[in-house]
Image (cartoon, rainbow, N blue to C red):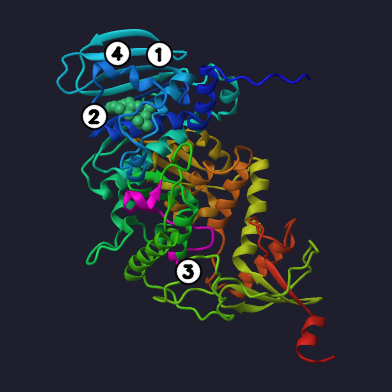
């Protein structure tokens, strides 16, 4: 191919390239529009999405509005009312400041803006197609702004191709609105998905009411309050709500962080919180938290990410330790902390992990002891059960020495193969419930249920919609009998929304087995242990649980001889 000469790109090409950074998917449009409404001081924001947001997105607010002579200006690249000089960048208090959202959206969709500002008698309606104004009109409306976005990415087929199903895109939108409803309890949020009311936050200003709207009343009532701000105002200030460990979830999707009112993704903050919960949660469980970090605007750079989803603190470490300390304080005050002697010397603190550990409460040993590596041989010999240790491990003898069997992991393996086989042969053991169980779901869980709820019946679930964000569970897989059903069902629903679409069945099966399996700490009778070991021997992959952890640890006769100096 011959080399083309260098040319400056045409403005519409530049716009499309820039739009690609800011507008990744329909939820990005919702984010930009909702942020504009919040910047305009709205106390009510309603959001409507159709066709996964590709068909239509409409965000209406009762904010300050835009004067008639400035409505078109709002669509110019780098036109903003929020920033006057470069020095203002140091102290940004608004969510927007680059003046690129509206032009970006207008370059990849049809946009209609309808706004009225204080003192005006008629609102201004402007329609923009392919970046050009195609209609101007004057009509009555109350103060505020409504932006309607249609046919998103129609002119960018490459982008359209990468979008997921409508249900998945709706899930992203629902999650985004959830986050803003959590962050701004003083604003009434209304979300309509495909014509259905999906979220309604009351706008009372009480953070707990925001949580109730998003996660349900039970979680809201149980949340513990954070605030490190009494007395000497320390910086950074940490406020918000964290759920007690018993309400932990199976995914990290319930960690919400806001920096000066802006929703951000932050591994550093997630790690600080998980550190604070360390030793209080079962493996694979994650907390529900809604945390605000407030720092003076000059101590945080909000201009490091195209969609402003990440921020950079001037003092990362101070934020990490303030966060970890405050969350740990509240948890320790409210929760009995389990005491356990570490079985190995405490690990040296890892210098890469910035903050010092708090010495408020003893923590579990940070890693398992370096025991003998599980053997590679996939099969398990016939074992003779000798007893149980710590109500957690079955001690057994085999032809090649001593075996310790992790009862929970082993049972998970047995159940997993059973669930998979039953599903394939369509002979699932089902437990009907005499009284249906009512569960309350978040908008995101609702999207998952709408998409996959029927498929769950192949596993033995019978779940029916029952009013707004409420479902009736009429039957569950028999292996869940005797478990906390509401929690089990909600966790299965959570697993639907995570990870790749292709392996959701496997995730559901794993989640079921984890719930149905005997727990560590459960005393087993000799007969129960024998049965469990026999069942494990007959599985296809007896050496590992479905999560990939070993079910058995083997000490060979030779190893024992060596340990006892019998050579
Ligand atoms: P930015 O938010 O970075 O300023 P945008 O492209 O998102 O850039 O918006 C451009 C301008 O349009 C804003 O600075 C604001 O003055 C005006 N604007 C946009 N949406 C609204 C709204 N909902 N209410 C009032 N003004 C708005
Ligand atoms: Mg904006």
Against 194, residue 269 (above or below) is below
N-term-proximal mark, 3 vs 1: 1
Tag nearer the camera, 2 or 3: 2
Say few, some or many: other residues with alpha carbon within 10 Å of mark 4 (under 14 / 14 to 19 / 20 or more): many
Residue labelled with disc 4:
125
Identify the mark nearer the N-term, 1 or 2.
Answer: 2
Sequence-wise, the earlier of marks 4 and 3 is 4
Q: Which residue corresponds to mark 1?
A: 128
How far, Cα to Cα, is label 1 from label 2? 22 Å
| Front: mark 3 or 1 | 1
Q: For ligand 1, tell me if the residue under mark 2 lies within 8 Å.
A: yes
Residue holding disc 2: 63
Q: What element carries label 1?
A: strand
Q: Regarding mark 3 in the picture, which secondary structure is present there?
A: loop
Query: Is residue 152 depicted above or below 523 in this figure?
Result: above
Q: What is the CA distance from the residue labelled 4 to the residue labelled 2?
A: 16 Å
* Residue range highlighted in magenta: 276-301
Q: Which mark is residue 279?
A: 3
Of residue 8 and residue 189, the one placed in the foreground of this image is 8
Which of the two labelled residues, at mark 4 and mark 2, occupies the earlier sequence position?
A: 2
SS class, disc 4: strand
Please name whichever residue, 359 or 376, is drawn nearer the observer in this view of the structure: 359
**Ligand 1 near label 1 (Cβ, under 8 Å)?**
no
Q: Does the residue labelled 4 lie within 8 Å of ligand 1?
A: no
Q: In this view, does 39 lie above or below 285?
A: above
What is the spatial separation of the Cα atoms under label 3 and label 1, in whole angstroms? 55 Å
In the rendering, at what x and y percent does residue 537 appear?
Answer: 74, 63
């Amino acid at each position: 191919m011959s080399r083309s000469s260098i040319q400056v790109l045409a403005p519409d090409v530049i716009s499309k390239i820039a739009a690609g950074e800011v507008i990744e998917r329909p939820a990005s449009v919702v984010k930009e529009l909702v942020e504009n409404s919040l910047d305009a001081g709205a106390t009510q924001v309603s959001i409507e999405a159709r066709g996964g947001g590709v068909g239509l997105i409409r965000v209406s607010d009762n904010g300050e509005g835009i004067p008639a002579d400035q409505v078109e200006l709002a669509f110019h690249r780098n036109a903003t009312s929020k920033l006057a000089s470069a020095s203002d960048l140091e102290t940004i208090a608004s969510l927007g400041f680059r003046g690129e959202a509206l032009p970006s959206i207008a370059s990849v969709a049809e946009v209609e803006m309808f706004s009225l500002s204080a003192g005006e008698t008629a609102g201004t309606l402007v329609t923009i197609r392919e970046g050009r104004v195609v209609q101007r009109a004057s009509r009555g409306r109350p103060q505020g702004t409504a932006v309607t976005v249609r046919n998103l990415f129609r002119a960018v087929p490459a982008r359209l191709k990468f979008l997921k199903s409508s249900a998945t895109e709706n899930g992203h939108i629902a999650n985004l609105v959830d986050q803003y409803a959590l962050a701004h309890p003083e604003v009434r949020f209304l979300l309509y998905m495909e014509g259905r009311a999906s979220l309604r936050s009351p706008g009372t200003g009480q953070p707990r009411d925001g949580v109730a709207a998003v996660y349900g009343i039970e979680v809201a009532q149980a949340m513990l309050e954070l605030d490190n701000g009494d007395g000497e105002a320390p910086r950074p200030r940490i406020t918000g709500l964290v759920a007690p460990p018993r309400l932990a979830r199976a995914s990290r999707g319930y960690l919400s962080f806001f920096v000066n009112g802006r929703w951000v993704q932050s591994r550093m903050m997630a790690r600080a919180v998980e550190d604070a919960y360390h030793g209080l949660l079962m493996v694979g469980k994650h907390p529900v938290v809604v945390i605000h970090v407030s720092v003076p605007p000059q101590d945080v750079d909000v201009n490091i990410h195209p969609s402003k989803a990440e921020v950079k603190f001037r003092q990362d470490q101070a934020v990490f330790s303030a966060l970890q300390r405050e969350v740990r304080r509240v948890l320790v005050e409210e929760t009995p902390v389990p005491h356990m002697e570490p079985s190995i010397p405490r690990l040296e603190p890892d210098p890469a992990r910035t903050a010092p550990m708090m010495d408020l409460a003893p923590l579990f040993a940070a890693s398992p002891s370096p025991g003998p590596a599980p053997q590679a041989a996939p099969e398990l010999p016939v074992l003779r059960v000798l007893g149980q240790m710590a109500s957690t491990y079955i001690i057994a003898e085999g032809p090649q020495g001593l075996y310790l069997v992790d009862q929970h992991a082993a049972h998970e393996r047995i159940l997993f193969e059973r669930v998979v086989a039953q599903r394939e042969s369509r002979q699932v053991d089902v437990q009907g419930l005499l009284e249906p169980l009512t569960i309350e779901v978040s908008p995101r869980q609702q999207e998952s249920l709408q998409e996959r709820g029927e498929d769950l019946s192949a596993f033995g679930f019978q779940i029916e919609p029952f009013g707004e964000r409420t479902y009736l569970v009429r039957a569950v897989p028999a292996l869940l009998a005797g478990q906390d059903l509401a929690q089990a069902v909600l966790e299965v629903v959570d697993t639907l929304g995570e990870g790749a679409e292709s392996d959701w069945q496997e995730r559901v099966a794993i989640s079921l087995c984890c719930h149905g399996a005997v727990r560590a700490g459960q005393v087993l009778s000799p007969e129960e242990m024998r049965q469990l070991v026999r069942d494990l021997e007959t599985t296809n992959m007896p050496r590992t649980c479905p999560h990939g952890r070993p079910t058995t640890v083997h000490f060979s006769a030779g190893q024992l001889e060596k340990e006892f100096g019998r050579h």
